[in-house]
Image (tube, helix red, strand yellow):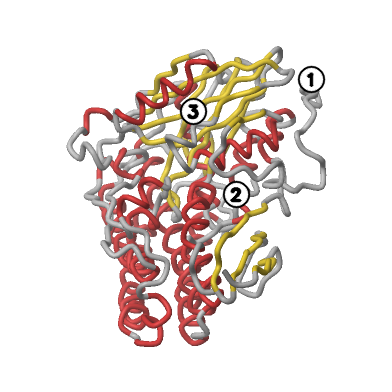
């Protein structure tokens, strides 16, 4: 009964990110959120977009429900990305978070807090260890 | 250009029920820039995926926040259920919908009370909390919990509610609707309330959309977007249309939340009248493998629970994007150019939930 959304993932190189995001923007997609996931050998950054049928440009496009994710893989050492905040201004908050918590250098952020968005007792970015499941 | 002064706002501040820090750069009494700092109560919940298996993590999701606890656990469970292709029984979906709407009532009444307190209307604050208390009592009767309900689980819900008890809840919620009308009249008609809210912190329609606003913040600016229209839980089986206001100011945001109170009463009644019989949960076997972005409409707007499993008991990644986090860019923009005296009202107007943001 619970309708699950159609969710797609498109993996792209970091160099193609801006061009692809610009296209998403021109097609009327909304940035839902962006987040980093650390894996074993590398890490991935997901930019999620949706066009839920109620966007400003296409109020009747109900068939377009779903979420599309652009995925960029980055190395663990010296990860670097261009900022997408020139296309989606609020992205600066996600990008500052990625910088502070995951140590990713994001170039050209619309608002750069220079590592001062997160002030935690444990210094950030957090050091990744192999997960200890406590079994 | 006047002399610039930096005033720290928070993390402890009389108007803030939870700690957030803003550095306000002022020229005379005008705010020219606001710089947020978060992390004061950062708990690292997402890291717990390494220690707790995907079933235990429901308890963590339930405890992300004390205001929107139930919807967090529901969003998390929906994510895991999508990854594991679990079909939840219809009765459980309807119960989830009823509890979600009661949680929304509780949250909006809490916000109204805090807002009244912020602009110095103590009796209105007391009335809001008095009505909210009755909602919390109902939640306790149905689930055993007043704030952290702990009834959601992967595959359904932990408790059933008999149909006659549901009918009684509907009767009592409708009775509360009469009291809420009296409350709404003061919030929407009283001159002293209007004086503090009308024309303050205006976001026009395009601005709200551009700034990535969600929830009542967005709908108060005329954008009809509500995650419930996706039809998750039992929202596809009830008549529902997003509440929208046009003016985009603090008063409009207040009006959206007040109208949503009555909408929630209606949704509880609809769901209770249509709830089917049957089981409230299914047995779940195996471990999650795959990923899904689950989203629900919190009282503050769209929440995202991203789950990624690799076929083991432990999730590989769990990420929560809360509505307050999404509304921070809009808050920063609204604060630019406002009077210092309006800062508390503007901060409250996004209905900030810091414990969500500091997940």
Q: Quadrant of the N terminus of chain A?
A: top left
Q: What residue is at 34 percent from the left and 28 percent from the top?
A: A66
B85, above or below B46, in the image:
above
Cα distance between the residues tagged 2 and 3: 19 Å
> Can you give x and y, in whole percent of width and height, for residue A50 in the image?
36, 32
Cα distance between the residues tagged 3 and 1: 25 Å
Cα distance between the residues tagged 1 and 2: 26 Å
Residue sitting farthest toward the left: A60
> Can you give x and y, in whole percent of width and height, for residue B79 in the image?
49, 31
Circle 2 crowding by C-alpha within 10 Å: few under 14, some 14–19, many from 20: many
- The residue where tag 1 is placed is A130
Between marks 2 and 3 in the image, the one whose residue lies nearer the viewer: 3
The numbered disc on residue A47 is 3
Q: Quadrant of the C terminus of chain A?
A: top right
Chain to which mark 2 belongs: B
Circle 3 crowding by C-alpha within 10 Å: few under 14, some 14–19, many from 20: many
Chain to which mark 1 belongs: A
Tell me the quarter of the picture where residue B73 sits.
Answer: top right
- The residue where tag 2 is placed is B357
């Amino acid at each position: 009964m619970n309708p699950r959304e159609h969710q797609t993932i498109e993996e792209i190189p970091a160099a193609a990110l801006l061009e692809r995001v610009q296209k998403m923007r021109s097609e009327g997609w909304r940035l839902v959120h962006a987040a980093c996931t650390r894996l074993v050998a590398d890490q991935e950054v997901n930019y999620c977009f949706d066009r839920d049928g109620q966007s400003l440009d296409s109020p009747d496009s109900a068939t377009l429900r779903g979420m599309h994710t652009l995925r960029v893989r980055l190395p663990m050492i010296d990860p670097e990305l261009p900022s997408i905040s020139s296309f989606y201004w609020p992205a600066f908050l996600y990008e500052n978070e990625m910088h502070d918590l995951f140590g990713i250098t994001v170039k050209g952020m619309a608002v750069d807090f220079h590592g001062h968005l997160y002030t935690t007792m444990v210094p950030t970015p957090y050091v990744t260890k192999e997960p200890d499941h406590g079994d | 250009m006047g002399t610039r002064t930096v005033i720290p706002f928070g993390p402890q501040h009389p108007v803030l029920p939870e700690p957030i820090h803003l550095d306000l750069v002022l020229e005379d009494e005008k705010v020219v820039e606001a710089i947020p700092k978060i992390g004061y109560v950062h708990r690292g919940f997402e890291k717990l995926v390494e220690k707790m298996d995907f079933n235990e993590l429901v308890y963590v999701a339930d405890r992300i926040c004390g205001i929107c606890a139930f919807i967090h656990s529901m969003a998390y469970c929906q994510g895991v259920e999508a990854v594991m292709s679990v079909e939840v029984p219809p009765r459980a979906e309807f119960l989830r919908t009823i509890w979600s709407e009661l949680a929304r009532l509780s949250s909006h009444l809490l916000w109204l009370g805090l807002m009244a307190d912020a602009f110095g209307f103590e009796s209105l604050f007391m009335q809001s909390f008095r009505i909210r208390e009755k909602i919390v009592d109902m939640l306790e009767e149905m689930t055993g919990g007043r704030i952290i309900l702990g009834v959601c689980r992967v595959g359904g819900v932990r408790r059933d509610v008999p149909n006659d008890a549901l009918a009684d809840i509907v009767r009592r919620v409708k009775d509360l609707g009469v009291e809420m009308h009296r409350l709404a009249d003061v919030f929407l008609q009283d001159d002293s309330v209007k004086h503090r809210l009308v024309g303050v912190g205006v976001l026009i329609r395009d601005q709200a959309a551009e700034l990535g606003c969600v929830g009542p913040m967005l709908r108060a600016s005329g954008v009809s977007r509500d995650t419930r229209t996706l039809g998750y839980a039992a929202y596809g089986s009830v008549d529902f249309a997003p509440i929208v206001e046009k003016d985009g100011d603090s008063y409009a945001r207040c009006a959206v939340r007040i109208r949503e109170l009555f909408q929630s009463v209606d949704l509880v009644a609809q769901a209770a009248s249509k709830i089917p019989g049957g089981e409230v949960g299914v047995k779940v076997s195996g471990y999650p493998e795959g990923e899904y972005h689950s989203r629900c409409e919190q009282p503050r707007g769209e929440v995202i629970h991203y789950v990624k499993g690799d076929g083991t008991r432990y999730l590989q990644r769990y990420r929560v994007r809360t509505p307050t986090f999404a509304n921070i860019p809009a808050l920063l923009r609204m604060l630019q150019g406002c009077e210092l005296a309006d800062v508390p009202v503007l901060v409250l107007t996004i209905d900030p939930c810091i414990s969500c943001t500091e997940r």
